[in-house]
Amino acid sequence: MDIGRIGVWHSMIGKAPAGEARRAAARIEALGYGSIWVNEGVGSKDAFAVAAILLAATERITVGTGIANLWGRDATAMAAAGVTLADGYPGRFLLGIGVSHGPLVGRRGHDYTKPLTTMRAYLDAMDEAERSLPKAEAPRLLAALRPKMLELSRERTSGAHTYFVPPEHTAQARRVLGPGRLLIPEQAVVIETDPARAREIARAHMAFYLTLPNYLNNLRTLGFTDADFADGGSDRLTDAIVAWGDPDTIAKRVRAHLDAGADHVAIQPLSPNTSDLTDVLAQLADLAPALDL
């Protein structure tokens, strides 16, 4: 599977009307990006159904789930969905799986007490289910931040998909994963050279994530403190999580992830209008030359 070095992650791709999502996927492919990531969060459609729509609307680009929530389906259903897309679109589908976050899992009525144990048992059940499914390879990635989940990614899957992380985390993750495993971080970006405006857009994006303990605990290991999380995020934290500036400046941040050990970086263009893909696609077009796709 050749996905290149730069892809696209954006929640609106999984929320937009199907026709708009198809057109966006075709445009992203035409610009030269190597992947599109479909999330599964509040207000999003089913990740596998959206992935099928995007795969059908494109010719070569890889589509990944970033991530498919294991609490949303049992292991047999997850395995079957992955095999179905891998069979229908050989070499073009990546199965990203995650345990989500305690506050979100609680809303579903599940117990988040032991996420690592849950993931390990879930992978065992997927392996068992796949023994009776048609043979089609859907490489698995785990949504992983901390060392133990990264270790499980190394031991049981093709690698890790990380989110809301600076390049310093990518370097740490590569050390845990070692060679031979995929490491695909997401990087939020905004083409805006005015610091106040850029950080305003960045903080609007960060607000929800700063309510989730998994991200905060991970950031603490990188030297950030509660003071950095207050009032929408310090300038230091905001600049670490969201790359902003002109296209060349943003490209430097993407290269920093690659230099730190990432195999592929999924960029997430931020827009003041979070319900419209038009600005997102415009930013992707502006960034393409600087990213040397």
Image (cartoon, rainbow, N blue to C red):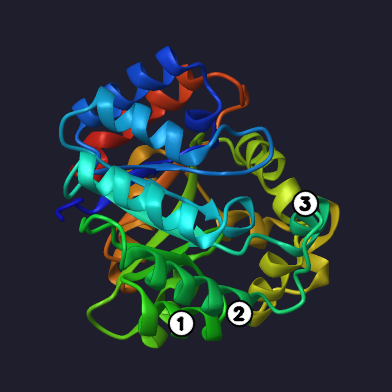
The answer to whether 94 is drawn above or below residue 217 in the figure is above
Q: Pick the residue in front: 31 or 196.
A: 31
3 or 2: mark nearer the eye:
3
Q: Distance between the residues labelled 2 and 1?
A: 8 Å
Mark 1: which amino acid?
Leu
Quadrant (top left, top right, bottom left, bottom right) of the C terminus: top left
Residue farthest front in this picture = 132
Label 1: few (<14), some or many (≥20) within 10 Å? Answer: many
Residue 253 appears left or right of 110 = left
Amino acid type, callout 2? Leu
Residue under circle 2? Answer: 116
Picture coordinates of residue 8, whole percent (x, y): 37, 41
- Residue position marked by numbered label 3 in the rendering: 108
Whole-angstrom CA distance, mark 3 to mark 2, is 18 Å
Q: Is residue 233 left or right of residue 14?
A: right
- Whether tag 3 and tag 1 are in contact, CB under 8 A, the answer is no
Residue 256 percent location from the top left of the image: 35, 64
Q: Which quadrant is the N terminus positioned in?
A: bottom left
Spatial separation of the CA atoms under disc 3 and disc 1 = 25 Å
Amino acid beneath label 3: Arg
Residue 101 placement: quadrant:
bottom right
Badge 2 crowding class, 10 Å Cα cut-off, few under 14, some 14 to 19, many 20 or more, is some
Among the two numbered marks 3 and 1 on one chain, the one whose residue lies closer to the N terminus: 3
Residue 192 drawn at (x, y percent): 51, 34
Image check: 45 left or right of 61?
A: right
Q: Give yes or no for contact between labels 2 and 1 (Cβ–Cβ under 8 Å).
A: yes
**Left or right of residue 212, residue 178 in this image:** left
Q: Name the residue under label 1.
A: 152
Q: In the rendered structure, which disc, 2 or 1, sits on the residue that comes first in sequence?
A: 2
**Nearer the observer, 55 or 134:** 134
